[in-house]
Image (cartoon, rainbow, N blue to C red):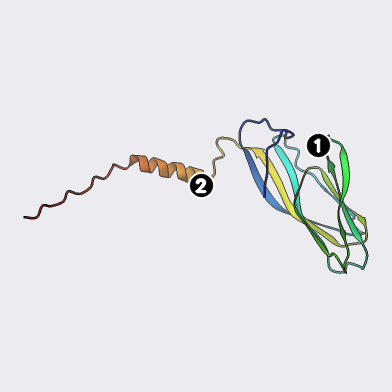
Amino acid sequence: MSFSHDESSEFPPTGDTKLESFLFSCELSSKVPFYIFQGDEEEDLEHFLELRTVCLGEGAKEESNVVEVTAMNHLGKTTSVPIANLHVKCLPMVSLGEFELKAPVTIRLKAGTGPVSVSGLHLIASQAEDSDLSEEEEEEDDDEAEEEELPSVKPAKKKKNQ
């Protein structure tokens, strides 16, 4: 998983970004042809959808199932792009790698009846505060403090043979 802090981010360039990831999955079919991914409305959070796989579900018919996503491009305009054209006989699954989109994102079954499963990660980026030190960082700080408090050890004197 990768996340880079770029100029298009809503966060100021100073400070560290804290990133949390959660499993994401949705199923598209003729009954539920689209899914809208939106983050919370909190000001200090950015939500991303990192799509990993698109695959046909059990009971899919011998037909083309086209999945498209709609999201904003770098100019702030909404753009729709087909990401998979699945068929039971020749291509039942597509791996997208780490296809990352900023919320809001609409995933639509443009053609076919499915079922099609879309999976990946829901990423939440927030400004890390100084008080948000991880437990490991706190333990490292404690270990360093303990090392500083220990007195230095002097080597033992050798006895002369008499």
Query: At 51% from the left edge and 47% from the top edge, which residue is drawn?
Result: 136
Q: Nearer the viewer, residue 18 or 91?
A: 91
Query: At 84% from the left edge and 68% from the top edge, which residue is drawn?
Result: 58
Location of residue 30 (image quadrant): bottom right
The residue that mark 1 highlights is 74
Q: Residue 55: image x %, image y %?
A: 81, 62
The reply, left or right, for residue 16 in relation to residue 33 is left
Location of residue 64 (image quadrant): bottom right
Q: Residue 159: image x %, image y %?
A: 13, 52
- Outermost left residue: 162
Q: Residue 147: image x %, image y %?
A: 37, 43
Which element carries disc 1, helix, strand or loop? loop
Q: Residue 94: image x %, image y %?
A: 80, 59
| Residue type indicated by callout 2 | Glu
Q: Nearer the viewer, residue 34 or 66?
A: 66
Which element carries disc 2, helix, strand or loop? helix
Q: How many tags in the picture? A: 2
Callout in the foreground (2, 1)? 1
Mark 2 to mark 1 CA distance (whole Å) = 37 Å
| Residue type indicated by callout 1 | His
The residue that mark 2 highlights is 136
Of the two numbered discs 2 and 1 on the same chain, state the one appearing first in sequence. 1
Query: At 57% from the left edge and 39% from the top edge, which residue is drawn?
Result: 132
